[in-house]
Image (cartoon, grey):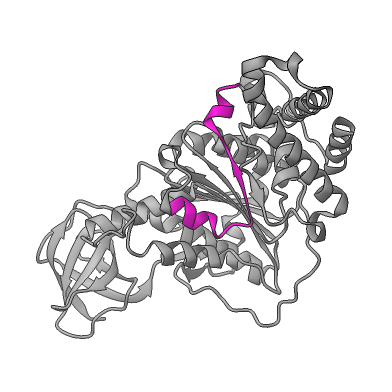
Amino acid sequence: MNKGIIRSVKGLVVGVEFDDDYPALAEVLLADDGQDSPLMVDHVTVKGKVICLNVRGVQTLQKGMAAVRTGKSIEIPVGTELIGRVVDANGRPVDGRPPIVAAKGKTLEYRSIFKSPERSTNFSVSKPEILETGIKVIDFFTPFVKGRKIGIIGGAGVGKTVLTMELINNVSRSGAGMAFFAGIGERIREGHELFQTLADNDLLKNTCMFFGQMDQNPVQRALIALSAVTLAEYFRDEHKKDILFFADNMYRYIQARNELSTILDQIPAEGGYEPTLFSDVKLLQDRLSSNEHGSITAFQTIYVPADDLSDPAVQMIQHELDGTLVLSRKVAEQGIRPSVDLLKSTSSLLSPDVVGERHYILSVQVQALLQKYESLKGIIAIIGENELSPEDRNDFAKARKLVDYFTQKMFVMEKLNGIPGEFVTREEMLSKIEEIII
């Protein structure tokens, strides 16, 4: 294959000069630094210099070194060998266990992590299938529907990761499908806790985990989501599996892309993010899709910088979701867990066609009571609850019972607080809500 010469090294950005036969975008070059360090082609300048990203962030690159074309983009191993394993963006194990190798007599298959979203022409839409999570506030306000996308939006420290861990724990137990977890730019401690929780509950046998955590460079953090989706697509298409895809945190994916944009000297968009914000979000989200072979049901956490829900990146991700559960610092300060803002949480799936007439009517009634509860709180602060009309007092009491009812003990917190977790079926939940509001 054709060779280039490294002409500049600036942090993670490496400039390579080729006389002819330029490499393709996203192609991997191997630097002649004694360890074949991979360089991923980002773009070619008008002067013909190939600008690459130092994938592993190695410090061994120098001007004058050769960089050999591979003709391939970044590829990861795919297959049942990855079930129960924890790998990085390149498919390398990070769980302290032996390297991933093929079963005896077989060859390990590799696939590129860069792929355009497919366009299915013969996939018929079936009746929506609701997946019970056992978490009341999710099952009622943002129903978890097979093949659709739900998001948890909230600032730092309001419980996004704990709620995600609880959801993985509850849904994986049901055996509803294979579970995938993509840890994008989150804390190392949280990744370890999730791995330990799944191991303790014997759930790793049905789970694949990808980690590109906050101690890693932005190239790794930006690629980890694509790697996880690539393996999910493989199991959906080749093994006809239904996939439960969990991503924590989708905002960190945008943040990593934005960091790369900055070091590549790209002019930011009006909101301060990378100029490719729309395509970055869209290309990833469109791959989290279902087809005639199987489904991918996605659950994503979205960090809100400075608790600003109008942030351009948050808005962009939110537009791709079918439902959003908003976690509130104000609610968390009241000691309510999960700290969900019941009035800001919305879902396009909360319709009679999806959840049924009974659930839909109850949701309308509950939202009306909660709206009234919020307006009455201000009046009560001034004149006191006893001055309200009997009807208003009755509605206020019902709404307060509903707020209390939607709090829940978590299984994943049992070891910390000694309080057993609870799993509430959808039927039990609807019956209890009817009992409260009637």
Quick one: 50 or 313, which is closer to the camera? Answer: 313
Q: Quadrant of residue 63?
A: bottom left
Region in magenta: 313-334
Q: Is residue 86 visible?
A: yes
What residue do we see at 71% from left, 33% from top?
Answer: 372
Position of the C terminus, as image quadrant, is top right
Please name the residue shown 70% across and 82% down the image. Answer: 122
Residue 157 painted magenta:
no
Q: Residue at x 39, y 67 (%)?
A: 74
Quadrant assignment for the N terminus:
bottom left
Q: Position of residue 415 (x, y in %)?
A: 64, 23
Give the percent coordinates (x, y) of residue 379: 65, 23
Is 41 left, or right, of 140 in this rendering? left
Position of residue 101 in the picture relative to residue 222 (left or right): right
Residue 181, given in percent of the width and then of the height, sits at 56, 50
Residue 88 seen: no
Closer to the camera in the image, 203 or 410: 410
